């Protein structure tokens, strides 16, 4: 055993020298080492002892009293076997970097890596270690499982990428459609404003023409008066009464234009509402039908040859709007006869101061009632009329029925409807009146109508000589 002790001592010294070469300094202090055989006293510090123990015994832990308690599982390297192979072990202490990389050597100690510790850290003293060859299959399975999970995550990420790209593409298309829609709305709005400008300028131009004519008339009359005043007595008296009568009867026609408060700049909410109503008007105009006027039965109403225009024919008898007139004289029925479906037509009444417009039953209940002293007793839904009307140039009315008697409703309109659209939905039992002059804003809606089997358009020019004209879709 002495020889073994000498060899151990020599081995420790060589380890010390090799350790110092790689930067590990061993300080010798008094500690006892016990191995197989008799107790041998030898002075070496505990740190060195643990380092040598890790090197020789492959991770055996040496206790404070010198006892060697092996904790390494599975094929722990025995000290005596290592002593026998000390020369080969010492050769592996220092190797070149190339061989170190090829043979999996520890970069810090220069040792070949045999053991594996499941606890991460720079120092593994006191940790449980395993032989790499035996622990490798277990970790191969773990890594294989990890690889499968990662591949699944990758596939999931790729699917998410495809989904996000599809969403991006969909959103791009939707946004592009919205852009085109907004641009189309602004184009439509621009057209509406341009048309409004043209109509307003045309009205003002017409009014200016009327004023210029009246100005010329007044100027001529002034010239006649001045000529009489500057002439002789005979010239002064000649036609003096005629000139004075002309001056007395001369009445200037005031321009009919929008009130000042209506001449304002549109606000954004106005524009949105205009677009909405304009779109609704476009929808109902798809149901446009060609309406014609049937021949009247008396001379008080004149139908133009194209059967698209009607006007009141003046007579010696005076009539008051809505009062004291004969239905047979003023009322005109239109074609076609409506028994189902949706129908739409427009009527131009630009210069009229009174009119009645809508639909009625083909044979109204009071068709032959003759003179009626109150028009309200006639134009009621219960009598087969669904109409609205104008009187006194500015009062717009709708007619309803009630248990107590006829009901007259006064309609408040911001813009006078010189052109009115009539939309009849037979199945929905609804009649809708639209102010086409004001972009198609609703004037009045009659709902829950008890229509008879046959419905026809109805027109009454009242006692106003200006015509009611059926419009064409192109107008």
Image (cartoon, grey):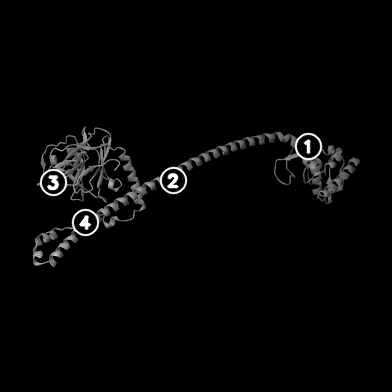
**Which residue is most to the right?**
3
Asked if residue 141 can be seen in this view, the reply is yes
Q: How far apart in space, not on screen, are marks 3 and 2 (Cα)?
A: 57 Å
Q: Which residue is mark 1?
A: 76
Is disc 4 placed on a helix, strand or loop?
A: helix
Work out how far the residue at label 4 is from the one at label 2, CA to CA, in angstroms: 51 Å
Q: Secondary structure at mark 3?
A: loop
Q: Is residue 79 left or right of residue 182?
A: right
Quarter that holds the N terminus: top right
How many numbered marks does the figure carry?
4
Of pointers 2 and 1, the one earlier in the residue sequence? 1
Q: Quadrant of the C terminus?
A: top left
- Graded by Cα atoms within 10 Å as few (under 14), some (14 to 19) or many (20 or more), the crowding at tag 4 reads few
Viewer-proximal residue, 108 or 399? 399
N-terminal of the pair, mark 3 or mark 4, is 4
Q: Which residue is mark 3?
A: 314
Q: Estimate the spatial distance between the alpha carbons at disc 2 and disc 1, rounded to whole Å.
A: 77 Å
Front tag of 3 and 4:
4
Q: Are marks 3 and 1 in contact (CB under 8 Å)?
A: no
- For the residue labelled by badge 2, is the local secondary structure a helix, a strand or a loop? helix
Looking at marks 4 and 2 on the same chain, the residue that comes earlier in the sequence is marked by: 2
Residue 376 x/y as whole percent? 15, 44
Q: Position of residue 284 (x, y in %)?
A: 30, 40
Task: Name the N-terminal-most of marks 3 and 2.
Answer: 2
Question: What residue is pinned by disc 2?
Answer: 179
Image coords of residue 334 (percent x, y)? 21, 37
Residue named by callout 4: 213
């Amino acid at each position: 055993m002495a020889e073994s002790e000498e060899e151990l001592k020599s081995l420790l010294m060589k380890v010390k020298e090799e350790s110092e070469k790689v930067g590990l300094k061993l300080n010798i202090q008094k500690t006892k080492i016990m191995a197989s055989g008799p107790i041998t006293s030898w002075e070496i510090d505990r740190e060195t002892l643990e380092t040598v123990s890790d090197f020789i015994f492959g991770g055996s832990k040496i206790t404070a009293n010198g006892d060697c308690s092996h904790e390494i599982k599975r094929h722990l390297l025995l000290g005596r076997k290592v002593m026998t192979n000390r020369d080969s072990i010492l050769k592996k202490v220092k190797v070149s970097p190339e061989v170190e990389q090829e043979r999996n050597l520890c970069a810090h100690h220069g040792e070949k890596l045999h053991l594996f510790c499941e606890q991460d850290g720079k120092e593994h003293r006191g940790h449980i270690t395993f032989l790499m060859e035996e622990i490798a299959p277990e970790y191969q399975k773990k890594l294989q499982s990890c690889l499968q999970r990662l591949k699944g995550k990758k596939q999931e990420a790729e699917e998410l990428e495809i989904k996000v790209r599809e969403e991006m593409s969909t959103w791009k298309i939707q946004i592009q459609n919205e852009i085109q829609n907004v641009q189309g709305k602004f184009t439509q709005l621009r057209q509406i404003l341009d048309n409004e400008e043209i109509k307003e300028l045309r009205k003002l131009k017409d009014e200016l023409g009327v004023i210029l004519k009246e100005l010329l008339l007044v100027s001529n009359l002034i010239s006649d008066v001045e000529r009489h005043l500057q002439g002789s007595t005979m010239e002064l008296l000649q036609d003096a009464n005629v000139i004075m009568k002309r001056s007395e009867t001369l009445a200037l026609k005031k321009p009919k234009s929008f009130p000042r408060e209506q001449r304002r700049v549109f606000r954004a909410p106005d524009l949105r509402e205009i677009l909405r109503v304009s779109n609704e008007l476009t929808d109902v105009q798809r149901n446009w039908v060609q309406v014609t006027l049937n021949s009247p039965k008396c001379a008080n109403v004149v139908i133009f040859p194209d059967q698209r225009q009607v006007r009141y024919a003046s007579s010696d008898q005076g009539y008051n709007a809505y009062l004291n007139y004969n239905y047979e004289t003023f009322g005109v029925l239109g074609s076609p006869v409506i028994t189902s479906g949706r129908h739409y037509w427009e009527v131009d009444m630009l210069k009229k101061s009174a009119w009645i417009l809508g639909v009625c039953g083909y044979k109204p209940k009071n068709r032959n009632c003759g003179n009626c002293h109150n028009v309200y007793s006639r134009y009621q839904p219960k009598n087969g009329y669904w109409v609205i009307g104008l009187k006194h140039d500015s009062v717009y009315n709708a007619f309803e029925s009630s248990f107590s008697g006829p009901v007259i409703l006064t309609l408040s309109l911001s813009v006078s409807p010189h052109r009115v659209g009539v939309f009849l939905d037979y199945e929905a039992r609804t009649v809708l009146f639209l102010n086409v002059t004001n972009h198609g804003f609703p004037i009045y809606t009659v709902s829950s109508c008890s229509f008879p089997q046959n419905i026809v358009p109805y027109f009454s020019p009242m006692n106003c000589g200006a015509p009611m004209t059926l419009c064409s879709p192109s107008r």
